[in-house]
Image (cartoon, grey):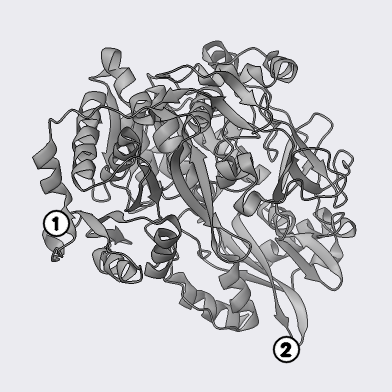
Amino acid sequence: MTSDELDIHTREPAKERIAPSSAFVEQANIRDSSLYDTFEREWPTVWNRAAEHVHWDSPYDHVFDEQTREWFVGGELNAAVNCLDRHLDEQKNQRALVWEGLFDEQRTFTYLELTREVEAFAAALRELGVEEGDVVTLHMPMVPELPIAMLACARIGAVHSVVYVGFSADSLTTRMAESGSELLVTCDGYYQRGGAVSLKNKTDRACLGLEWDVTTVVVDRLGEAYEYALGPNDFDYKTLREDHYGTEVEPVARAATDTLFLIYTSGTTGKPKRVTQTTGGYLSYVTWTSHATLDLKPSDTYWCTADIGWITGHSYLVYGPLSIGATVVLHEGRPEYPSKTRLWEVIERNAVDILYTSPSTIRTLMKRGESYIDEYDTSSLRLLGTVGEPINPRVWRWYYEAVGNGECPVVDTWWQTETGGHLITTLPGVTDMKPGAAGPPLPGISASVVDASGESVDPGEGGYLVIDKPWPGMPQELVDSTRWASQEGGLPNTDGWQYVTEDGALVDEDGYVTILGRVDDVIKVSGYRFGSMELESAIVAVEGVAEAAVVTGTHDGHERGLYAYVCLEDTYERTKRIRKAIHESIERVVGPFARPDAIIFTPELPKTSSGKIVRRVLTDLANGNDLGDTSSLRNPEIVGELESITREN
């Protein structure tokens, strides 16, 4: 996107300000507004404050090495000790993990019980030959054995690589080959949309694609519903656990700069992009942001609805909350499945204090209406959070008012797999909220919005979001400028180190950042270029619209046109009035030239398991293209219906 293409990729900055309630501020972990100035004035040594939230086996020599860009050099620690052992003196009988199974099963682990489970599997891994620095691949659904395996790896100094369970066998092979992983922990299968899916067959195929033999540990999730045979290199998790339960495993002290885990995200070349997180900086940062942004306390029950296969699950479901010493809810499947009231049931049953979920989930709940909420006691909620994509102002307000009763602050967090943790959001006990704007950069984070030449843009003008100071949670690739981060700066007129996020944004006069979406997520029609977020926000602003996705397609057989796929709230029906309201909203917010050529009402949009809309499928539908493999979608059954609806329109 060049500088002359950025002017359309904008929208009006958020203006409404909502202050946190005095009741929330009084109990907030952070209440001092001077913290921003302190971090600016005392950077980088001020990041001692993050390091103070974790236990160090050996103290670090200095906070930040400006030559190597490494954090807490010389220090040693163990992530499993921070998440488990250090809580045992005072919290050994407190619930650490509560698993909510798909069929109303519940398994609970106290901190002492979870520590024993982790030690048992750590001992088993050592018996299987896993040594410090080895990469162990975890390809599992949302079962307790997944965080147990992560922490077992951390305890013995091994590196875990969690591969999302929905990925194909080829995707698993690619990631294991890239990391050199020789040990895989998986399940016999998992449940998807109520049916059993074989996982063992898929992992067997994946291992055949590697040039070395793989040792596989299999967790039994399906029970008698699915029988499978263990091969010569396969081991049963339950048997290993029983053989080693009660074994004490001395944790391995890891250097702050040693690798804790690998995670793979989408790369611009189509190949998966490895992100390498180190132990000291990452753990300090996610613990500190859990404390500061999520206001998380050891006494809290906390539910993050993300899958552990994604970075949100790593940072804010496992490492951050357990390092704080909170009670973590681990939920199998989608939070709105199998019943429309599932989310509210889990909140009431566990007296959840903090809910951290995606705008996509919120839109689904909003679509179903408030009557479902009223059936359950959600008064335990103290703070709400959003993650994964920008949230529309109207959806934000519904979340704040209907779910939070106008009393729970909403932290709209911007960050990426590449950043490790939150970078831009409000501090809930300090800063006002602006619906639609993520907020200012966190204390110690320096972010700016620039044009294609690297020059700062005026307030309210769209541009590229860049981070121009290091932070403790940055991955190894940004530390040493390797792999995908090998090109420093990336934009002209850049003086010094800079991370170009590839997200478009605008910043207002108060320093609040509004995320516009990926810079390559731009629609071009009749010579105009728009950000899809801009058009979709205009549609969702219409009363009765729950969510929308806009793509380009072939109009009248030869022209490029705009196709708007629209989901309505349950209590609304598709009418000419709503079509007219959508057109009027787009004309008012964007302009008459942006009117959709087709408005297609649909009960659902195709989504990934993490709730992101798969616009590729909609684009192929709008252009009559082959849809390819859609099996990894969270709701592949909607594709056939969308094909029929698109043809009719």
| Residue 408 visible in the current orientation | no
Few, some or many residues within 10 Å of mark 2 (<14, 14–19, 20+): few
Looking at the image, residue 599 lies above or below residue 283: below
Q: Earlier in the sequence, mark 1 or mark 2?
A: 1
Numbered disc 1: secondary structure: helix
Q: Of the numbered discs in the image, which one, if any, rests on residue 557?
A: 2
Q: Which residue is at a point 37% across and 23% down the rendered structure image?
A: 325
Where residue 462 sits: x, y (%)? 82, 48
Q: Which residue is at a point 67% across and 15% down the rendered structure image?
A: 35
Q: Where's the N terminus, which quadrant?
A: bottom right
Q: Locate residue 196: give its quadrant.
A: bottom left
Looking at the image, residue 9 lies above or below residue 93: below
Where residue 269 sits: x, y (%)? 62, 65
Residue nearer the viewer, 297 or 545: 297
Side (left or right) of 502 relative to 25: right
Amino acid type assigned to the residue bearing label 2 in the image: Gly
Looking at the image, residue 156 lies above or below residue 568: above
Q: Which residue is mark 1?
A: 223
Few, some or many residues within 10 Å of mark 1 (<14, 14–19, 20+): few
Discs 1/2, front? 1
Numbered disc 2: secondary structure: loop
Kindly report the distance in space between the C-alpha atoms of the residues bearing marks 1 and 2.
53 Å
